[in-house]
Image (tube, rainbow, N blue to C red):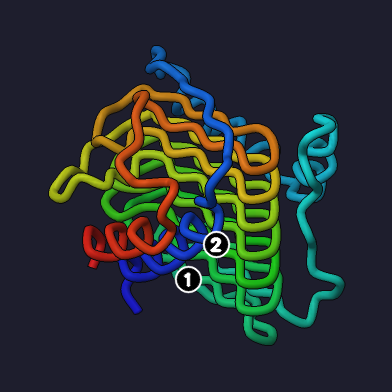
Amino acid sequence: MGSLSVLAAGLGIGAALAATPGVAFAGTSPVDGGAGALGVAGALAAADIGDAAATVGTAAAVSLPTLPDGFGNFAISISGVDLVSLGTASASSSLGNFAIAYGAYSDANAMSGFFNYASAEGDHSLAVVGDTGWFNYASAVGDHSSAAAAWGNGNVATATGDYAVASAGASVVAGVYDSHYNTATAEGLHAIAYSGWDGSSNNTASAIGDYIQDYSPEGNPFNPGDATDFWADLWHLFS
């Protein structure tokens, strides 16, 4: 399966499951993203997933992610070389990229661009980076969590929580491949954060809390009240 199909399947299903009636919304306006590339460097330097999982509990309304209970499913791929491949975890990388997957049917994909990092920790978790971009970072922590940082440079997507979804720079607008320095952070059960969803750059989306959603620029390209339409529309755009 190509990386675009993987992205559509993972983010589409994850967002569809998270997009249920009665969720809260938090609007975020575009901000100067000059520190986007620095954010990637910082994220790479602090890529200890266990620490990320531990800090999410500091907010009372944020549920902790479910983590794997063993290393029977574990994979590491660096610069196109598969270093570890155990169980059903899958890690794929191309030259200059890094991918780590931990959990049953977890999938980390860094198959294009350069100096991109994808980390998926949790059963059925998904992290995708690249697709023509450089210095992108995607981290998904939790059962069925999904993160994508693609189609641009210096995008950072962090999803921490079961069924959490974070997308930075991965525009839902067909034919847009230059969305840069976007940051999307989703922390909590079914949290959703989309940054640069319209193909623009220098946006920040932060959804902190269970069932919280945030889109930057402000607006919503989908219908959050109808999970079926959400999944179908996203699949059509990326297939």
Q: Secondary structure at mark 2?
A: strand
Does 111 sit above or below residue 206? below
Q: Is residue 58 left or right of residue 124?
A: right
Which quarter of the picture shows residue 144?
bottom right
Q: Is residue 49 left or right of residue 178?
A: right
**Viewer-nearest residue: 167 or 95:** 167
The residue beneath circle 1 is 92
Residue 64, x across and y down, in percent = 81, 48
Q: Residue at x 78, y 82 (%)?
A: 72
- The CA span between labels 1 and 2 is 6 Å
Q: Quadrant of the C terminus?
A: bottom left
**What's the residue type where badge 2 is placed?**
Ala
Q: Position of residue 180 (x, y in %)?
A: 32, 32
Q: Secondary structure at mark 1?
A: strand
Reading the image, the residue beneath label 2 is 99
Left or right of 64, for residue 186 = left
Please name the residue shown 22% across and 58% down the image: 237
Pointers 1 and 2 in contact (C-beta within 8 Å) = yes
| Residue sticking out furthest to the left | 175
